[in-house]
């Protein structure tokens, strides 16, 4: 069996970690790129959302490299994600790629992973591999994922202060590579500590007072830096401290009900959105609206809403957000992403948005009579 | 005399404007970019220098437009600003009480909402081309109407033909249909203006509070038919400023002046940059599957700037 999976942000680190610890084989598709996107666009229905196109492209590239089993995390809808698997199977079959499909609905993802590991493949190794091995492998993958997220978080905090543009991003990419190649928990810890030290030692101007911006929206485009045109990097380099509302780990923890006590859990966000949305719209819609409220209350300067073009739940969220923006006096900028999204266009609008936030802050400080920037 | 220079380099046109300390426009230049921003900037600088009185000192310079960063490097800009801000600054300078700005250029169109001289909201067409100048050009050509006469012709129409304006493809086929069924050209032309206005207000202006005074600028503002269609749709006057086509350049010149108040000394390299040998080139990095297209700017053969890499590997120049 040569299993593969479509990318979503750095989820590959998690899966690769597990696979590595189990001693199994996986075909990791090349990271999402223009090539994957073009393949996806070519074979996907035109109006399907961007995540579908990218994932399809990933799978085609994986099949070209000999994959024969697809593991896919899915959702229960009501939007298209719940139905991603079937049309993909049909499209790929028509292209001549036959494969075993293992579609995991997120709430049961963990269960499904064990099933995959234990029932199917592991039969071959039964005398060698136990349930405990499975748990340990899972633990290793999880730890790796957390390490990646930790350095990503740190990079978001450091980037607005960096003196030489690009230093943080360079450090982050090198750090991710180092963490990726760790083979065991000990090496992982060592690699992570070294990366953190390197990132911290980047020359910084701590006199700056960065604007604070939160990013929310549809999960795939929030997590995937290729899909969102490196928006975190762009904002950071424009001098903003970015906070991302969804992480792979928080998403999983939410689904297994372990995020209840976190400061900004999805549940809290959904509850905060209740005055505007009484019923679940699907996917991240309610949470997106709620996060805008929570961050506005925390005094954030701005809020960025990411959505794939034609995304139903986020389209609804966008409509509600215009009201939240007025009611809570927080500028909100919705970015629709699709295959033709241009870097230049996005940059033009981001710069204007950041400028708008700066002037707003100056005005507020002027009114309060406190010291200016 | 002290003057300030603004350059707006877009994908279709490159505009330059020079203002004095009182922000009065002394000279302007409008040329086609033709896919070669560096050449356009250098040509523009040469042309505008000829129009200036001999005793001038450039106190500051700024760049805007989609090639603003490249231009900023070339000329040594004191400020590099997004065209959304530049357009808003110019409009609020000319009409201080402006609340809404319509900006329609060749490739894109924007709506900017201003309150008390500050941008509070904006939108830009990113997906649909139906609301841009190229669309009008294209349709004018199809109808055999020179684009300069398009506006006047539209004004002659008493009963504009209704053209479906939802998207370019529909608009075009609908227009051909109307043409074949014998509608007069002036009516179709007027109908097209209305369709474009509807499309623009629905798509770009979606959910925005469009309060007067409205300033209408960008290349398409030359089209009187468009101005009339806006006024009819909105029910109030739409102001087209004198320098409607170079507002971005004027705006960034004003911003340069503001910057100089703080920094005191300009980084502007002088009109001589039109003689310097600048080049850009690009290569595909094969360091990882991202295959980034990295762009390099060379000055007299030496790399002075790089961008386009996602990982920072090339952007950080080793000193
Ligand atoms: S949430 Fe939006 S982008 Fe994601 S599958 Fe549903 S419709 Fe598509
Ligand atoms: S520039 Fe960096 S991210 Fe881009 S292809 Fe090269 S190594 Fe990969």
Image (tube, grey):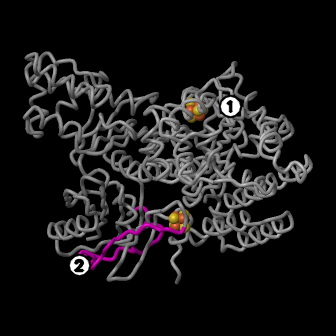
Is residue A326 visible from the viewing direction of this image?
no
Q: Residue at x 16, y 67 (%)?
A: B47
Q: Quadrant of residue A120?
A: top right
Label 2 crowd (10 A; few <14 / some 14-19 / many >=20)? few
Question: In the image, is residue B277 part of the stretch drawn in magenta?
Answer: yes
User: Which chain hosts label 1?
Assistant: A
Who's the residue at 46% across and 46% down the image?
Answer: A39
Kindly tell me whether residue B55 is visible in this rendering: yes
Which residue, given by chain and number where applicable, does mark 2 sit on? B275
Tell me what residue is drawn at x 37 percent, y 40 percent: B110
Rendering coords of residue B84 (x, y %): 40, 48
Image position, residue A208 (x, y; %): 64, 64
Q: Which residues lie in the magenta part? A: B258-287
In the image, residue B42 sits, relative to residue A228, either above or below, namely below
Q: Is mark 1 within 8 Å of ligand 1?
A: yes
Quadrant where the N terminus of chain B sits is: bottom left
Q: Does residue A265 belong to the magenta stretch?
A: no
Foreground tag (1 vs 2): 1
Q: Which mark is residue A75?
A: 1
Question: The numbered mark 2 sits on a residue in which chain?
Answer: B
Q: Which mark is residue B9?
A: none
Mark 2 C-beta to ligand 2 under 8 Å? no
User: Does A247 sit left or right of A40 as displayed?
Assistant: right
How far apart in space, not on screen, are marks 1 and 2 (Cα)? 60 Å
Asked if B231 appears above or below A28 in the picture, the reply is: above
């Amino acid at each position: 069996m040569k299993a593969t999976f479509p990318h979503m942000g750095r989820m590959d680190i998690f899966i690769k970690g597990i696979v590595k610890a189990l001693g199994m084989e996986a075909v990791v598709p090349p990271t999402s790129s223009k090539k994957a996107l073009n393949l996806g666009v070519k074979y996907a229905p035109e109006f399907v959302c961007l995540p579908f196109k990218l994932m399809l492209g990933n799978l085609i590239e994986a099949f070209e490299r000999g994959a024969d089993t697809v593991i896919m995390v899915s959702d229960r809808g009501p939007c298209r994600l719940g139905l991603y698997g079937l049309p993909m199977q049909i499209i790929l079959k028509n292209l001549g790629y036959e494969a075993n499909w293992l579609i995991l609905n997120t709430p049961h993802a963990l269960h499904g992973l064990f099933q995959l590991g234990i029932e199917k493949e592991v039969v071959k190794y039964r005398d060698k591999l136990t349930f405990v091995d499975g748990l340990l492998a899972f633990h290793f993958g999880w730890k790796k994922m957390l390490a990646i997220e930790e350095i990503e978080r740190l990079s978001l905090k450091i980037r607005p202060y960096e003196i030489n543009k690009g230093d943080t991003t360079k450090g982050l990419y090198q750090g991710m590579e180092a963490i990726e190649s760790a083979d065991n928990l000990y090496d992982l810890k060592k690699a992570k500590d070294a990366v953190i030290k390197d990132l911290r030692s980047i020359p910084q101007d701590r006199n700056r007072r960065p604007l604070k911006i939160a990013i929310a929206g549809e999960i795939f485009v929030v997590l995937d830096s290729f899909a969102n045109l490196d928006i975190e990097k762009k904002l950071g380099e424009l001098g903003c401290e970015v906070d991302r509302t969804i992480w792979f780990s928080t998403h999983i923890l939410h689904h297994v009900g372990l995020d209840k006590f976190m400061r900004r859990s999805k549940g809290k966000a959904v509850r905060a959105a209740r005055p505007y949305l009484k019923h679940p719209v699907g996917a991240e819609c309610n949470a997106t609206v709620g996060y805008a409220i929570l961050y506005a209350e925390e005094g954030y300067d701005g809020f960025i809403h990411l959505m794939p073009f034609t995304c139903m739940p986020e389209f609804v969220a966008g409509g509600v957000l215009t009201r939240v923006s007025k009611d809570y006096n927080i500028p909100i900028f919705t970015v629709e992403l699709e295959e033709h999204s241009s870097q230049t266009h996005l940059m033009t609008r981001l710069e204007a948005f950041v400028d708008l936030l700066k002037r707003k802050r100056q005005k507020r400080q002027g009114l309060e009579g406190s010291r200016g920037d | 005399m002290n003057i300030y220079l603004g350059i707006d380099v877009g994908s279709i046109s490159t505009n330059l404007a020079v203002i004095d300390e009182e922000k009065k426009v002394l000279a302007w230049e409008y040329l086609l970019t033709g896919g070669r921003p560096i050449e356009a900037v250098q040509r523009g600088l040469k042309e505008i220098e000829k129009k200036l009185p001999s005793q001038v000192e450039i106190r500051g310079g700024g760049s805007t437009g989609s090639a603003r960063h490249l231009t900023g490097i070339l000329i040594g800009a004191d400020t590099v600003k997004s065209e959304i801000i530049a357009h808003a600054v110019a409009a609020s300078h000319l009409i201080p009480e402006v609340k809404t700005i319509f900006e329609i250029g060749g490739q894109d169109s924007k709506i900017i909402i201003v309150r008390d001289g500050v941008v509070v909201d904006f939108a830009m067409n990113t997906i649909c081309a139906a609301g841009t100048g190229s669309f009008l050009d294209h349709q004018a050509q199809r109808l055999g109407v020179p684009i300069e006469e398009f506006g006047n012709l539209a004004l002659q129409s008493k009963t504009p033909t209704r053209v479906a304006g939802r998207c370019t493809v529909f608009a075009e086929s609908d227009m051909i249909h109307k043409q074949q069924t014998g509608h007069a050209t002036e009516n179709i032309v007027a109908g097209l203006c209305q369709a474009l206005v509807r499309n623009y207000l629905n798509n770009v202006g979606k959910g925005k509070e469009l309060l007067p005074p409205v300033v209408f600028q960008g290349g398409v503002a030359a089209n009187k038919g468009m101005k009339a269609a806006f006024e009819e749709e909105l029910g109030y006057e739409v102001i087209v400023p004198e320098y409607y086509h170079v507002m971005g350049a004027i705006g960034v010149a004003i911003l340069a002046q503001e910057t100089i108040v703080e920094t005191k000394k300009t980084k502007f390299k002088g009109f001589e940059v039109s003689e310097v040998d600048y080049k850009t080139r690009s290569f595909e990095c094969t360091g990882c599957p991202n295959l980034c297209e990295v762009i390099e700017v060379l000055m007299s053969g030496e790399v002075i700037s790089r961008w386009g890499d996602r990982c920072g590997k090339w952007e950080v120049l080793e000193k």
